[in-house]
Amino acid sequence: MPRLLPLWLCVVLLFLLLIVAAPVTSVGDDGAEDPVATLETVQRAFQQVIERVSPSVVGIRVKRRYVAVLPGVRDGPDAGTFEQLVVVNASGTVIGRDGLILTNEHVIQSASQIEVMFHDGRTLPAAIVSADPRADLAVLRVERAPLEPAKFCDWSSVARGQWTIALGNPFGLGGDGQLSASVGVISNLSRRLPGLGEVDDRLYHDMIQTTAAINPGNSGGPLFNIHGELVGIVTAMHTRSAVDEGIGFAIPLTPARRRLIEQLVEGRSIEYGYLGVTVRSPEQVERATAGIGQDFGVVVVEVESGGPAAKVNIREGDLILRYKHQQVRGPANLAEQVAATPVGQSVPIDLYRGPKRLTVSVIIDRRQVSRISWMRGGAILWRGMRLANLTPDSRLRMNADVNATGVIVIDVLERSPAERARVQIGDVIEQVGEAPVNDIVGFRRRVSSQAGTVAIAVRGRGTLKVPP
């Protein structure tokens, strides 16, 4: 049986333990706590973290080539055109010792050249390994090793109010490799950014909101915690001007995002399910009529002609209650559930179509780039050409009649089928095959079933054949 220590010795040991465990505070000559010294301790902590993670952060410079067309000049195949080079500044994070770098997909979209600037001032060209427009993530590779990869955080420990550190290349100021740092806090989690990514079909539904200063050029860069661990990828700022106003957003590096990044590192393309509807949250009277509570269900606003939903007679005004037997908790939740569904899978969807409730089985299709914003009549990308509806301004610039119909080419990607077919920025496409097209919706419907070479009639240039 062990012997007990004397009482006096226990008291002494307890006193010594309390002294060791007591928090260290800085005191001045008069014995009072020194607040400046305390701030200096915090300041040194931030400096140490920034110094430690700097080798894992890079500046990115992207060059995009645009071919502009002088309106009304069509004498030859190359007449009236001039090339314009646009430089975009951005940021990235090293995630692999063998030269892998993570950034935003919107940073490298349509890039003709990508350069990466390292903390030691060295600049190297980069190639795209894989990219996912929907998640707005891309992985690049440079021929340099070994690099120092950033460490991912334990996502379960991330919470509102925690410190954040953003490193990046705002306004291209980090061209020498010395990237800019800003400090803030996590203002909130799971922020949805409606409208911000809709034109390019991006899913910004669970973003980190931070007060760390975010400016043009920070996109694609890291958001660290005070341990120097990667929490998110800086993506957007909320502003009414061209500079930061204190609200920035980052893509959270959740376990699901990390699995997606692993697929991109392997060079795999990411596949998303597609239903073919646009939806909104129900009004209170619609909830009451259907007998559902708050944060439950979505109302179908439009249905894509020929899409998966249309094939099973889902209609405008239907209220979608459950998807795969899981409650639908708003538009973003439905988009997330559909995106995660394997292509070709049959899915039960519970609907309320007053006064009836019914269940339909939908075969989920693959989400395609050409389906971008089909309901909004906005720009779409098809075979390397970006197309938009004609407007009074674009008709005027192209010397087109005010009643002219068709769609206008606003961008042509380098080395794309459209470029090989000699499609040019400013071309107005009036027909697909033998059928006239009046707008983006009509154009998309005409080309959606075309698998081979497609003939398009271009105003003033005749017929061009676009390969697949």
Image (cartoon, rainbow, N blue to C red):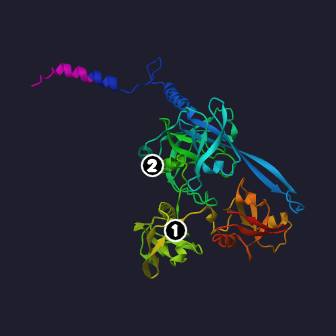
One can see residue 237 in this view: no
Magenta span has 4?
yes
Q: Say what secondary structure mark 1 lies in.
A: loop
Q: Which mark is residue 281?
A: 1
Residue 138 on image: x %, y % = 58, 48
Quarter of the image with the N terminus is: top left
Q: Quadrant of residue 323?
A: bottom left
Decide if residue 457 is on the left or right side of residue 282. right
Q: Are marks 1 and 2 in contact (CB under 8 Å)?
A: no
Query: Relative to 192, does residue 173 appear above or below in the rendering?
Result: above
Along the line of sight, the residue nearer the viewer: 12 or 171: 171
Residue 312 on image: x %, y % = 50, 77
Farthest residue, direction right: 75
Q: Say what secondary structure mark 2 lies in.
A: helix
Decide if residue 89 is on the left or right side of residue 77. left
Q: Residue at x 85, y 68 (%)?
A: 460
Tell me the kind of residue under disc 1: Ser
Residue 336 on image: x %, y % = 49, 60
Q: Which residues are magenta?
A: 1-14
Q: Which residue is mark 2?
A: 255
Query: Relative to 334, does residue 355 appear above or below in the rendering?
Result: below
